[in-house]
Amino acid sequence: MKSEDIDIKYMRMALDEAHKALDRDEVPIGAVIVCKGRVIGRGHNLTEALTDVTAHAEMQAITAAAATLGGKYLSDCTLYVTVEPCLMCAGALAWSQIARIVYGASDDKRGYHTMCTAPFHSKTTLTAGVLADECAQLMTDFFKKKRPLKIKDK
C-alpha cells in the first residue's frame, strides 16, 4: 500500500473519531495514533463532557497511546488528526517525541502555526492536507449549526 493510501486510511479513522465528538455536540476533531501499523491510541474532543479545556482529541489519543505502550515517548508513532493541532497539543506532542504528524484541515484561528513556527520535536515530520476538504467541512458544518448567520434589519 502506498504511503498516501495509508495516510488516507488512518485519517478516515480520525474522521470517525471526529464524528463521535460531533454526536456528543463537541467540536468535531478526532485523532488516532499508529505505531508499526497498529492503532495504539484514539480520541476525540471531550472538553464539554469533561468540563476540561485540555481534553482535546490529540491529548486523549496521546494518553491512550502512552498507556498502550507503557511509556510516555511516541518516537516510533504517527498522529493522524483531522485539524491542525493547537499550540497546547503541539507542546504535548513535542514532549512525546512523536515521529510524525499528519493533519487534515488547517486552523487559521487557533492552529499552532498562528502562534509558533516550530513547536514540534526536531525529529518530527509533518504532513498537512490529508482529506483536508472533508475535515474542514465537518468543522464548518458544526460551527454553522452552533452559530447561525444572523440577518440584520435595514
Image (spheres, rainbow, N blue to C red):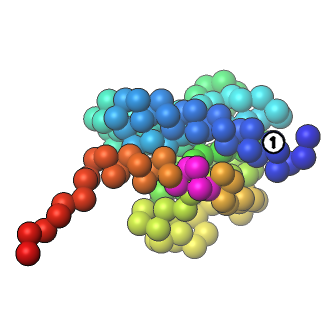
Q: Main secondary structure of the magenta part?
A: helix
Who's the residue at 28% across and 47% down the image?
A: 146
Who's the residue at 51% across and 38% down the image?
A: 18
Magenta residue check for 39: no
Question: Most extreme residue toward the front, as rendered?
Answer: 154
Given residues 133 and 36, the one toward you in this image is 133
Indicate the amino acid at tag 1. Answer: Ile
Task: Locate residue 46: give its quadrant.
Answer: top left
State whether residue 147 is above or below residue 33.
below
The image shows residue 121 at horizontal and vertical percentages of 67, 59
Given residues 64 and 145, the one toward you in this image is 145
From the image, tell me which residue sits under label 1. 6
In the image, which residues are magenta? 132-136
The image shows residue 145 at horizontal and vertical percentages of 31, 46
Who's the residue at 59% across and 56% down the image?
A: 133
- How many labels sit on residues? 1
The image shows residue 33 at horizontal and vertical percentages of 67, 37
**Secondary element type, mark 1:** helix
Task: Locate residue 79: give its quadrant.
Answer: top right
Asked if one can make out residue 85 in the rendered structure from this viewpoint, the answer is no
Who's the residue at 24% across and 59% down the image?
A: 149
Given residues 5 and 58, the one toward you in this image is 5
